[in-house]
Amino acid sequence: MMPKRICIFVHCSTSNALAPSVLLYLQELAQHCSEILFVSNSELTLELQAKVKPLVAEILQRENIGMDFGAWKHAIERVGWGCLEEFDELILANDSCYAPMFPFDEMFNVMSVAGNDFWGVTEHPAGVTRSGDLEAHLQSYFLVFNKGVVSSEVFRGFWDAVSVEGSDYNEIIGNYESKLTPMLNRAGFNYKAYIGYSDDPSCTGGNWSNPLYVNRTIWNWSTLLQQKSPFLKKKAITFHLERVVRLIRSGYGSKVTAATHRHTFFWKECIKQSKTLYPVDVIYNEVRASHGKVPVESARLSERLLFAICAPLRFYRRLKRNLSSR
């Protein structure tokens, strides 16, 4: 019998749009949750809200402050702890991922028998990053808490302390995402990540040449898909596209690594190789809408659209030759 779950799902779009990927995610969530509370940090039209309504119990719209943690706090206060205690599990999720890359069934089946008080999909190791000196913690794009955690004073105290002001990404990570897991763990609650660390050196703590590399959802996303992660971070694709643009524009095209070449030019192929049933064209169209008109100015490449050079093999080979000749 499926546990009684409530999910608080956060949506945000700077253009007040509703991407098809969000609806696909909600459709999968609806199969595993008794209720979904949809919180939008954007102003959705009534027409767009109508697309969401069949999948959720309630829609809340709010100002885009405090990012996802501010939105989760807003929804928790709206619902109330008494209501949340009626559920076996509380899920906190956001629209920063494409899902389901693989059905949620296996993930929930595995984690339901693991006997953890709370869990997530991936864990960020301890270390110094742009968000500060962080302890190991579950990444917050998908978190599940049982009734014991939800009823605890430490969990409620955490949300009381969350500020709905401010929208600095690194501060949100440093002040909230990285603090929640160790705080609950020290209070006696055990946790686990659905997909543990691999043997890849970039996933281990210690001496990192670049602290960003430790984030597997960005740098090891293709490996995570091979491990059947149901989630693909949207930033996993756009981060590498934007990075290549910055390097080429700055005259450091030779710094584009082999891994970045693969992530930038062959991401569609990497996704398909994972044997996912997710409609990859949904991702392609979404990325193209946001990055299809970004020009790359280079004396060797002439001026081309970033998305154009990131698709066909012939452009990849030409770029590789040009970069290696510098």
Image (tube, rainbow, N blue to C red):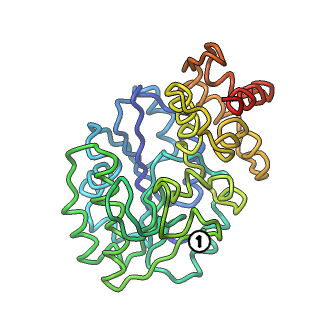
Q: Report the side of 142 relative to 151 (left or right).
A: right
In this view of the protein, which residue sits in the foreground, 199 or 110? 199
Q: In this view, does 309 lie above or below 206?
A: above
Please state the horizontal and vertical placement of residue 324, each as a whole percent of the image. Answer: 71, 33
Q: Quadrant of the C terminus?
A: top right
Please state the horizontal and vertical placement of residue 23, each as a whole percent of the image. Answer: 56, 40
The residue at 23%/77% (across/down) is 153
The residue at 54%/64% (across/down) is 121
Three-letter residue code for mark 1: Gly
- Residue 235 in view here: yes
Q: Report the side of 257 relative to 124 (left or right).
A: right
Q: Residues within 10 Å of mark 1 (few under 14, many from 20)?
A: some
Residue, disc 1: 196
Q: How many marks?
A: 1
Q: In this view, does 192 lie above or below 64?
A: below
In this view of the protein, which residue sits in the foreground, 226 or 265? 265
Residue placed farthest to the top in the image?
Answer: 303
Q: Is residue 170 above or below residue 308?
A: below
In this view of the protein, which residue sits in the foreground, 310 or 74? 310
Q: Is residue 190 above or below residue 158?
A: below
Please state the horizontal and vertical placement of residue 43, each as a whole percent of the image. Answer: 34, 30
